[in-house]
Image: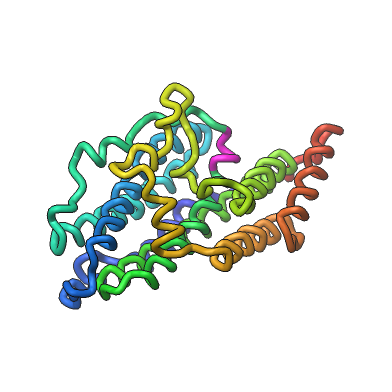
Amino acid sequence: MNMLYPELFKSLEAVRWRMDHDVPWDRFEADRLSDEQARTIKMNAITEWSALPATEMFLRDNRHDSDFSAFMSVWFYEEQKHALVLIEYLKRFRPELVPTADELHAVRFDFDPAPALETLTLHFCGEIRLNHWYRRAAEWHTEPVIRHIYRLMSQDEARHGGAYLRYMRKYLAELGDTARAAFAKVGVLMASARRTAQALHPTNLHVSKALFPNDTVQSRLPDPAWLERWLDAQIKFDDAWERRVVERILHNMGLLFDRSFDSVQELNRYRREVTARLAAGGEPAAA
C-alpha cells in the first residue's frame, strides 16, 4: 500500500496557519480578558506541550511503520505550535503567567509501552474530543484574539483526527479483524465518558505504572484539578456537548466499519462479534 505521509503532508501544509500572519494580535482587548481566563490559557499551553512525550511514545511503539512515524513530524510540529501560540499570547498580554521551563518539562515523562492500534484509536478519539473542547472554549472566552486562536487550534485537531482515521483505514485493510477489535474496544471506552468520573482524553489517562498516581499529564500541571474545573464550571462542557463528541466517534466508527452505530451499546455488540470471530479463527486480513 502506498505511504500516506506524502499526501497528508501536502494537504496539511496547504491549510497551515502562520502565527505572524493569521493571528490578529492587534485586535487584543485587555478589558475582555479576565484573570480566570488567562490562567486557563496557561494550563492549556502546558497540556499542549505534552505532545513531546506523546511523540516519543508514538515513535517508540511504531518502529515497524515508517509511514506513520514520518507523519508524526507533522503532528508534533502542529501540536507544539499550539503550545507556542498560547505562550506567545501570554508573553504579549499576561507575561506573569508564562509557563516556566520547569513547568513545561514536568509533563515530559516516559509512557509505558502500549499496543499501537489501541493507542492510535485513543488519540483519534482524543482529537475529536479536543476539537469540541476548543470550540466550546472559543465561545466561553470573551477576548477576540484568544477566541480566534482557539478556533484555529480546534480546526487543526479536526484535521489531525482525519489523518489518524486514514491510518486506521490502512491498518484495517492490512490486519482485518485484529484492527477492528482494537478500534472498537477503544471506541467503546472513549464514547462512554458520561459513565466515568474523569474526562476521557489521552492527557487525563494513566500511562506509567512506576509513576502512579502522578502518571497523567494533567496530574503534573501546576494545578492538577484544573481540567475538571475548566470543563464543568468554566467552558461548561455539558451533556449536550458530550453527546456531540459521542455522535462523532460513533459516526466515524461507522464509516470505518461500513456500518451505522446509533449508540455505544451497538458499537459494543459489534466489538463482541469481532472478538468472537477472532477467537474462532479470525477473518483473513486483506491482501
Secondary structure mostly seen in the magenta stretch: helix
Q: As displayed, is residue 114 above or below residue 254?
A: above
Q: Does the segment drawn in magenta span residue 285? A: no
Q: Position of residue 90 (x, y in %)?
A: 19, 58
From the viewer's perspective, tell me whether residue 154 is left or right of residue 104: right
Rendered residue at 40%/54% (across/down) = 229
Q: Nearer the viewer, residue 110 or 223?
A: 223
Q: Position of residue 267 (x, y in %)?
A: 74, 53
In which quadrant of the rendered view does residue 26 lie? bottom left
Rendered residue at 80%/36% (across/down) = 278
Q: As displayed, is residue 274 above or below residue 19?
A: above
Q: Nearer the viewer, residue 155 or 286?
A: 155
In which quadrant of the rendered view does residue 246 lie? bottom right
From the viewer's perspective, tell me whether residue 159 is left or right of residue 145: right
Q: Nearer the viewer, residue 256 or 45?
A: 45
From the viewer's perspective, tell me whether residue 259 is left or right of residue 211: right
Rendered residue at 66%/41% (across/down) = 182
From the viewer's perspective, tell me whether residue 202 is left or right of residue 243: left
The part of the chain drawn in magenta is: 115-119
Any part of residue 29 in sight? yes
